[in-house]
Image (spheres, helix red, strand yellow):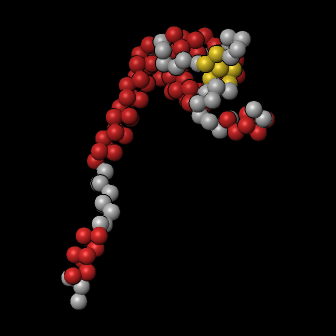
Amino acid sequence: MTAGDSLGRLDDDDYPACTMGRAAEMLNTTQGFLRAIGEARLITPLRSAGGHRRYSRYQLRIAARARELVDQGTPIEAACRIIILEDQLEEAQRINAEYAAPAKPAALTAEHVGRHRRYQV
């Protein structure tokens, strides 16, 4: 892997580029908070070869949402459950929208084209 390949992966929302210390600093929280939401199975950070936790940008957004709820007085376990339910609702709404979207018109067959020509003046 070249340096260019590595830098390109930083744009990937799922690439675990952030250490626990840096993640805690970015979220203005503690490493204990990140461990707690990991234990609650809200996020599962990947591990480096040395066993250190690494967080992706997607996981940091989830952790930030958990932090927001906890700061508002929600117990951490409840905050994690709320976020999981919000995620499930969003996914269900996305699927419903796909089913509700009008079907794309079928490609015209030779029969349809011929029939159309018959009625032209």
* In this picture, residue 74 sits left or right of residue 35: left
* Residue 28 visible at all: no
Quarter residue 34 falls in: top right
Up/down of 33 relative to 110, above or below = above
The quadrant of the rendering that contains the C terminus is: bottom left
In x, y percent, where is residue 64?
55, 26
- The foreground one among 115 and 96 is 115
The quadrant of the rendering that contains the N terminus is: top right
- The foreground one among 32 and 75 is 32
In x, y percent, where is residue 10?
68, 35
- For image coordinates 37% across by 40% down, the residue present is 94
Quarter residue 23 falls in: top right
Q: Residue furthest right?
A: 3
- For image coordinates 29% across by 54% down, the residue present is 102
In x, y percent, where is residue 100?
28, 47
* In this picture, residue 105 sits left or right of residue 19: left
In x, y percent, where is residue 8?
70, 39
* In this picture, residue 94 sits left or right of residue 25: left
